[in-house]
Image (cartoon, rainbow, N blue to C red):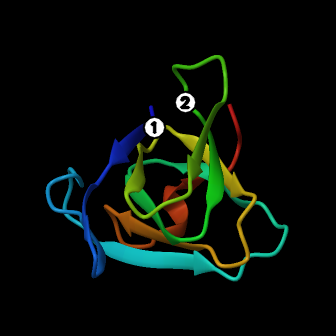
Amino acid sequence: MAKEICLKTYTDHRGSLTVIEKEIPYPIKRIFYIYGVDESIRGKHRHKTTRQFLVSIQGSCEIHNKSSKMDEWERFVLDKPSKALLLEPQDWHYMNNFSKDCILQVFASTEFDPDDYIYEPY
């Protein structure tokens, strides 16, 4: 099941600094970011093994998630860089409602492997 995580943020008159230190529970093998998204829906899959840690470092987007252990969909809004979402392999998810300035950064537990993707929803 997906888990929302609040990241430590330090703010003073100079601005803010958000730290990701021990929140990612796996070695990072791949980092990518999604930006410049139009009205499209992204994602629409789950994984066999990959875990993902998502942070909207700018702007906002929604992540909709359903796990094999759930009857209902979950909706998460990533709208500040101090908010993150941990997705497990069984989390079938899609992303939408990207603001024009959204940059969604993803820290993945595996390198890209097309055979790791499962597109059929629950």
Name which quarter of the figure residue 17 lies in. bottom left
Q: Tag 1's secondary structure?
A: loop
| Percent coordinates x, y for residue 116 in the rendering | 49, 57
16 w.r.t. 62: above or below: below
Q: Residue furthest left?
A: 22
Report the side of 19 relative to 45 (left or right).
left
**Circles 1, 2 touching at the beta carbon (< 8 Å):** yes
90 w.r.t. 119: above or below: above
Residue of label 2: 67
Name which quarter of the figure residue 72 lies in. top right
**Is 70 or 85 nearer to us in this picture?**
85
Q: What is the quadrant of the C terminus in the image?
A: top right
Where residue 10 is drawn, which disc sits there?
Answer: none
Q: Residue furthest right?
A: 39
Residue at 64% across, 59% down: 61
| Percent coordinates x, y for residue 103 in the rendering | 56, 76
Q: Along the polypeptide, which appears first: circle 1 or circle 2?
A: 1
Residue of label 1: 2
Residue at 58% across, 76% down: 34
